[in-house]
Image (cartoon, coloured by chain):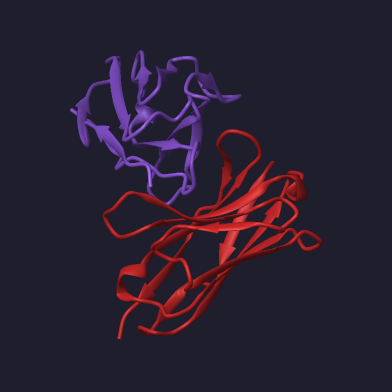
Amino acid sequence: EAQLVESGGGLVHPDGSLTLSCVASGFNFETYGMHWVRQAPGKGLEHLSGISSPGTSASYADSVKGRFTISRDNSKKMVYLHMASLRTDDTGVYFCAAKYFRAFDYWGQGTLVTVSS
Amino acid sequence: DIQLTQSPSFLSASVGDRVTITCRASQGVNKFFAWYQHKPGKAPKVLIYDASTLQSGVPSRFSGSGSGADYTLTITSLQPEDFATYYCQQLNTYPFTFGGGTKVEVK
């Protein structure tokens, strides 16, 4: 069974940094593009970033460009999101998701990030 | 970014009802369009991709249609396990934006 498990969330001060991790199992990780999606409290889903299956190209939403960096390690079946210059409006549940073809096929259950002083 | 306007935001329905949710994109998205179901504390689940293709394992009471900028998700006979929030998503242009969500509640 395909599974994604996020970790690394927690409480961080404004302007601080945090790195989220996501480990995959049960599917051919190295053939999937990987993505991070955020859900702010009481809000909908926001696509933040994605990285190609070999890890050679990455894209970002304007809201996180220049502050967040996505990376992956196919040998460990891991994808990461390094977040810097965090703001209070970065608070939310962060999901990793795997895309093979035309949809986000697999999702994790999310990890909560709270940015507060 | 492509904006997705999803309606309604909330929907009260009973078991057995037919439910329709619509999503309008700010520009055409070439049927690169998906629908997801999300329950609190759970991983979102893809229901439909390519606007109308049912994901493997998803019950046939779910269906999708549409083209260009307008898309629809239909649940023909709502079941107890279908009470959840539904999101549309376009995968034509980065970032792959989502609609605002439709919460389907018990009437």
Q: Is residue B96 above or below residue B16?
A: below
Decide if residue A41 is in sight here: yes
Q: Nearer the viewer, residue A65 or A117?
A: A65
Residue A81: give x, y in percent of width and height: 56, 67
Q: Nearer the viewer, residue A64 or A9?
A: A64
Extreme residue toward the front, this view: B27
The C terminus of chain B lies in which quarter of the figure? top left
Q: Nearer the viewer, residue B33 or A38?
A: B33
Decide if residue B104 is in sight here: no
Q: Which chain is red?
A: A
- What residue do we see at 73% from left, 49% from top? A29
Q: How many marks?
A: 0
Q: Where on the picture, by quarter, is residue A19? A: bottom right
Question: Could you tell whether B44 is left or right of B75 in the image?
Answer: right
Residue B68: give x, y in percent of width and height: 40, 22
- What residue do we see at 27% from left, 36% from top? B5
Q: What shade does chain B have?
A: purple
Q: Is residue A23 above or below residue B21?
A: below
